[in-house]
Image: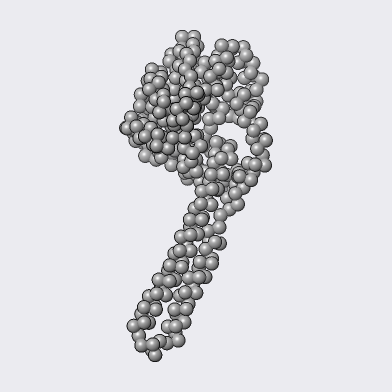
Amino acid sequence: RVTQNSGEFDKKTGESRTYSSEEVKKSWKMKEWKIGDTTVQAIGVGHVPEAFLEFRKEIEAAIQGAEVVVNEFAPEALGFYDRKNAAKLREIKSAHNPNYNLEQLRQAYVKHERDFDIGEFHHEIELIAAKYGKDLAVLDLNTKSPELALQDHYFYAQEAEKEGQFSSNRKKAGLYAGAVGLGLAGLGKIINNLSKIDSIKISRRNFLKAGLMAGSAAALAGLTPKITETPPRLAEKNASQTSSEALSKMIINNRLRDPVLADSLCKLSELGYKKIAFIYGLNHLDEVEEYLNDPVKRTNKLAENRKTITSMNADPFRLFRLSPGENQDSDKFVASKKMVWERVK
């Protein structure tokens, strides 16, 4: 099932290709690191679906040869594709626009992940890990539960607002057409019936009835904008107002991600994993390697920023294992309906 899905994934990617072969190859690098007697196969790659068109063989080989796969973002394991979360997410309002709930934001994420290269690549890594029965580790400060992640980024709220506006416009068009169509159809029926009657017998009542039908259609069409009104697009407005604040936060975040990753790789080694596949953005490889090779620098960096790290993500080390369980509510997990990613305690 995964192999068939991957073939369809690559076919779809090829048909809607955004990144050229040259662009993908510029973002590719393979390294090998040692942590004691643990070997880390490190792959630096652009997180775009086109990466699999160029390097699927290499990525699959690294995953197949590993015991655990480290991936920057695992939407399936984290619950982004799990419809069971819908009821809970509907009860939480977006911090960026309280007129929307987090389930609307989640749906916007799932719908637009290809457009913004935020989930499809990572989910393909999850599926390949499931295909070969490998454990999955998510060790990043950016990795959060759907509730926290959806609240943390303006993107999801902005896309939900756009979806709401599109839906409203479509509904308006439908109601206008439906209202006018209903009126004209009814009017036409009455006129058709009246035409069968001698003009002398057309009563004032029937004449008024025909006029009322046409008038009702126009009145209903005039009311539809109020029926389909959408909330203001606050997230987009707020994002532009606080862009410098968001940029500052992102810079601090990226500066601390690499020592946390290096420390987490050491923890995986301590847990007994001898072969690790580390599949990450190319820009992380040199920094993570530096922190691995300099334990003192890594320890000091983590100690100096412990409070900031905890405030950003108090639970960045997450380890998952494919385990028996009902998986009927996933939007995208094709590996099995009887297996789920279960967090290892």
Q: How many marks?
A: 0
- Is residue 145 visible to us here? yes
- Is residue 45 visible to us here? no
- Residue sitting at x 49%, y 9%: 36
Q: Position of residue 67 (x, y in %)?
A: 41, 18
Pick the residue in front: 239 or 90.
Answer: 239
Pick the residue in front: 11 or 96.
Answer: 11
Quadrant of the drawing holding the N terminus = top left
Left or right of residue 4: residue 306: right
Most distant residue in the bottom direction = 200
Residue 185, quarter of the rendered image: bottom left
Q: Position of residue 344 (x, y in %)?
A: 45, 25
Q: Position of residue 66 (x, y in %)?
A: 40, 18
- Residue sitting at x 44%, y 25%: 136
Q: Position of residue 55 (x, y in %)?
A: 41, 24
Say above or below: 67 vs 174: above
Pick the residue in front: 9 or 261.
Answer: 9
Q: How is the image coloured?
A: one colour
- Residue sitting at x 42%, y 87%: 203
Pick the residue in front: 85 or 161.
Answer: 161
- Residue sitting at x 38%, y 75%: 189
